[in-house]
Image (cartoon, helix red, strand yellow):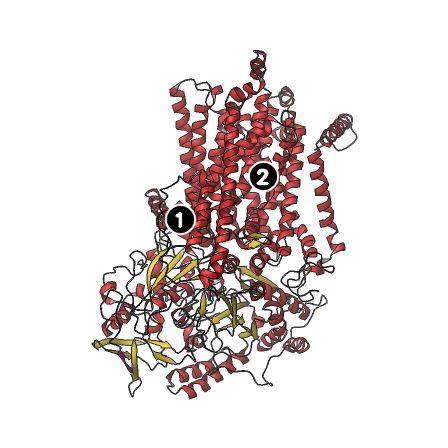
Amino acid sequence: MSPQEQHGARRSHPRSHRSRTPRLVALAGALALTSSAALATPLNPAPQQAQAAGDRVLTVAVAQSVDSLSPFLAVRLLSTSILRLTYEYLTDYDPGDAHPVPGLATSWKPSADKLTWTYTIRSDAKWSDGQKVTAQDAAWTFNKMMTDQAAATANGSFVGNFREVTAPSPTQLVVRLKKPQATMTALDVPIVPEHVWKKVTDFSKFNNDKSFPVVGDGPFVLTDYKADSYVRLKANKSFWRGAPKFDELVFKYYKDQDAAVAALRKGEVSFVAGQPALTPAQAASLKGQSDIRVNDAPGRRFYALATNPGAKAKNGQKFGDGDPSLLDQRVRHALFMAVDRKTIIDKVFQGHAVEGQGYIPPRFSTYFWKPDPGQELAYDPAKAAQLLDQAGYRKNADGKRVGKDGKPLNYRVLCHATDPNDKAVGQYLKEWWAKLGIGMSLDCLDNVTDPWLAGKYDLAFDGWSVNPDPDYVLSIHTCAALPATPKDTGATDNFVCDKTYDELYARQLAEYDPGKRAGIVKQMESRLYDLGYMNVMAYPNAVEAYRTDQIKSIETMPRAAGNIYGQDGYWSWWSAVPADSGDSSGGGSTGVIIGVVAGVVVLAGAGAFLARRRRATADDRE
Amino acid sequence: MTAETATGPRTLAWQRRRRSMARFWRQYRTHRAGLVGLAALALFALVALTAPLTVGSGVTGVTDAPGSPLQAPSGEFPLGTDRFGRNLLGLVVWGSRVSLLVGLLAAVLSVVIGTVVGITAGHFRGAYATVLMRITDWFLVMPALVLAIALATVMPHSLGTVILAIGVTSWPTTARLVRAQTLAVESRPYIERAKALGGGHWHIMSRHVLPNVMPLVLAQTTLMISSSVLTEATLAFLGLDDPTVISWGGLLQDAREAGAVSSGDWWYLVPPGIAIAVVALAFTLCGRAVESVLNPRLGVAR
Amino acid sequence: MSIQPTAPDSASAAVDKAAVPVPAGTAARGPRARTATAYLRYGAAKAGGAAVSLLAVLVTGFFLFRLIPGDPVKTMTGGRPVSAGQLAAYRKEFGLDLPLWEQFTDYCRKALTGDLGTSYQFRTPVIDKITEALPNTLLLTGTAFVLYTALGMFLGTRSAWRHGGLGDKLNTGLALTLYSVPSFWLGLLIIIVFAVGLGPIPGLFPTGGMESGGKEGFAYVLDVAHHLVLPVVTLVAVEYGQTLLVTRSALLDEMGSDYLTTARAKGLRDDLVRRRHAVPNALLPTVTLVFVNLGRTVAGVILVETVFSWPGLGGLFYQALSVPDLPLVQGLFLFFASAVIVMNTLADLVYPLLDPRVGR
């Protein structure tokens, strides 16, 4: 699936961000202007307006553009991250171990029949326009999503199982379910102020980006947005959990990760994440830099090779054109056993990843599972060849393995043209499988959604960011997630449909005891591993970097070793502490020098240009 | 050109042409820039043709890459290594094959289309020519890069797509030039004579017009290769090329994706770019020299 | 560098004298008009031709992007689970449920009233996205355009005056070299050297973007100007060569003319002859080139905008293509092509007014 776009599928495209030394930049800019003088008519030389000196600005470089600022439409990681900062959810995840902690709701409890959940809404939360946040706002938000299809665009899946949502009192929210649902403390839905949003007529077109500041109740208030340039947020001083330490947060857009890294190196931004990680070369070069800290932490993503199990719809209709040989489990296992995961970690990720095991990354220790030695599909090309022989795919005279139809096997592997890792790993796969006698062609597309949904692939690079509650990434391999007919789009990731897996899935969803639920989830992972449709090659690290002369400290999630950008919560930006002297000392002196030099150069250039012009005119004059 | 064998007039024509070739070469030799361009081209052609012997196709293999990723230039790897640890010098050499081939084929495709359109539009007047020239004009004003990107996007990423995208968007200039030349040629008296002697359309176009526009076409092809090489690099850089094929533009794209710009790994970025620029420049120089030989009025150009 | 037209002072000049720059090639075949009516007739013909071209662009824009394989609605929903009913609703919303020809007439009707549809990914009218990014692109290309035209004409004139000399050789050599350099590559190198800083050279300029944000008034202008420097330098470097070469060859061409000999015979000083007679005449083809370039530059700026993260139309186009965001791609395509056509037509209309040989 094109995970970038999918809900919950944060195949993130984050980027860095930037801090600044406003006056100096302005000075340099002023001088620069003189140079590009030719066109700009000199404006009133008003005194330069530096920012109020005390303002602490945290600039984050990002590589993704905003798709929408409406919480009902936004699906991209950048947009949902920003909305997470502006609208509080019912519950948050603890930055330490991701267990649910109070957000807008201070407490919650299910009824005995597991079908009714009652949330107590805090009474000390206020919207940024001064009105109180009430349970009615939450009820309105959920009801809107349940009744207006356009409002269900982004987060509709959360309310699919809701029967009714009411707010009997300003502090009490009651949700009635159709079936028990273990994820009721993981409702990642931004709660919006009813008094503002009820005026919206068409939710499919309203992007929430016209009138600023946007009324919200999160740690930051959205104050400005310019497409493909920046998103600005101001600290919400009256945030109930406490005001953020920085006064302002800016997400600045770079089209290219390398430019963002360069900006960090220069101090134009304070933070740069990767898309989804800094490249090994970038990380290596930044590590040697003073004032820059590279955060190389276990990631929340898995990076897998998905195999087409023969796409079909819920009504039993088959579609797509996956290679029939892949329906043989031995072939799938053989293909994966020919993949040297260690080399991928060493060469492609250059150590910034962990070798793949089960479906859920080790970072989520509660749910992490690894195969028994007997079950493990370790790298073993000889055994892979054996398996293929057993399955009846023998080599012909040219050394190519032949399918049942007599033609040499040649698999199409779908790859994201925008992901360098896909292309790199693809080249390795090609050579490894060639040794097995199997051909492969790498099918790199900007947008893989289409062949993917149509089941027109043999294998594909797949990857998802896993949420603290794994329900979503587990649900996408159930039969229920298949599209109803070939015409529909289902939630399914890879058309996997397995009875055993489905039974386990239903059991874990109804299991409210965390320990027991984790046990069932591990059984599911084991089943998935054996099926061989989802072969996890690696868990890429979150590799990101920030300037220590601008950010003194910032919270990672998990606290011990975790990521900063794309957290399940607003912890990083909310907790970030500005460095005291940073701007004035480090950035300051260099900045001044840079500014002055820039000015001189630019003036010299302008002078030379003008001189030339004058000479030219002089020449022309009689 | 036509001349085949021994019949009297054919031989004469052949001799005449050989003489004019010699004259052409004598004049071409006086253009120093043209010679430099030609020498550069010969060098690149040699490098590309002998690549299987000098570096071998093994240079593109990732599983048995000799170095570790992104090593700086050294005795072992004069241009360092790429993100897989492959020898960059070898890759640049190997990449010349694809870049030159694509440039050449795209230019040929473009010039062939342009020549056919130009000659027929010049030969057959009337509605046919009007329609054809309208289409040509329309293609001329289309922003070619935008169109090429659009084409490369709607078709599967492959070398064929790139060639097609370049060829289909760049032919109109040639068509206009060839048409003008065709009109000039056909106004000459001997064409009247050929017609009177019963020469059909095909005869006139292939035996009289084509040989006369050939020099122009040659110059045009040379210039077109230059821009095709650049466009190929551009499309590869935008990721519209086949990612498993090594070309100069593709190497630049790899370099950027690997983070070579911010890491200061210049050896990954500089050589492919220089190669592109040098080849493009060499073809431009040759094309200009050819042109000024053919058209002495422009001879002042050099 | 966009796809380059054939090298600057190439064969075109040889064949069809005035047609050097103007693709539509009309100047030469242009009006023999001696009267205003004739000119009007000529103008009407040109405008009519442009209208036909615009119509053709409209048609192509529609059908070309319908070739993209797959279902736009599924693409639009980005693979999120959607029922057939919802998909049908989306189809209806975007008019994709209608038969093709109806979609086409609908699209034409709307396009003519300036409605280019709604972007799939931004859920915003395409025209709004374009008007949002257009000023940024115009700022960048306009600045670069003025500079490279001035620089190209100036150096081209000088080069022609002293043709054959060392200065001329260096001048044309440099122009040809820069002309052969891929613009994106040059941009990256410029970033490494002047934005990141290399060795003793400090990084003086921002690495990308158009503004730092949060600035107002004069500080804002300065900030934007500061961001403008590197992309403009890149564009000027790769584009000025063409203007230079055309100016140079046009002037050289002119210098061989009979009337100049006559003028010289009258006893006018050589440099006077050049300045009073040759230069004004030679600049004519360049003037038309100017118009053509302006349209072309807008389209060719895609790469520079991408490399420098400039929030303009080029970047938007590239972003739209990778989704693909059909209405946005279509709208931008229409816009780019129309820009070029309009500029060309202007060039055609202006040329006869300027050219004394056309004798108005």
The segment highlighted magenta reads A116-129
Examine the structure image and report whether residue A496 is included in the region drawn in magenta: no
**Residue type for callout 1:** Ala
Q: Position of residue A60 (x, y in %)?
A: 44, 62
Q: Position of residue C30 (x, y in %)?
A: 47, 24
Looking at the picture, does residue C222 appear above or below residue A181? above
Task: Chain letter for mark 2, please.
Answer: B
Q: Position of residue A416 (x, y in %)?
A: 52, 62
Looking at the picture, does residue A239 appear above or below residue B174? below
Q: Position of residue A50 (x, y in %)?
A: 38, 54
Label of residue C133 in the image: 1
Considering the numbered disc 2 on the image, is that residue within a helix, a strand or a loop?
Answer: helix
What residue sits right under mark 2 in the picture?
B113
> Does residue A422 appear left or right of residue A484 in this picture?
right
Label of residue B204 in the image: none
**Residue type for callout 2:** Ile
Considering the numbered disc 1 on the image, is that residue within a helix, a strand or a loop?
Answer: helix
Residue that sits furthest to the left in the current view: A169
Could you tell me if residue A411 is visible in this image? no
Q: The N terminus of chain C lies in which quarter of the figure? A: top right
Q: Residue shown at 74%/47% (left/top)?
A: B46
Residue that sits furthest to the right in the current view: B6
Could you tell me if residue B36 is visible in this image? yes
Q: Residues within 10 Å of mark 1 (few under 14, many from 20)?
A: many
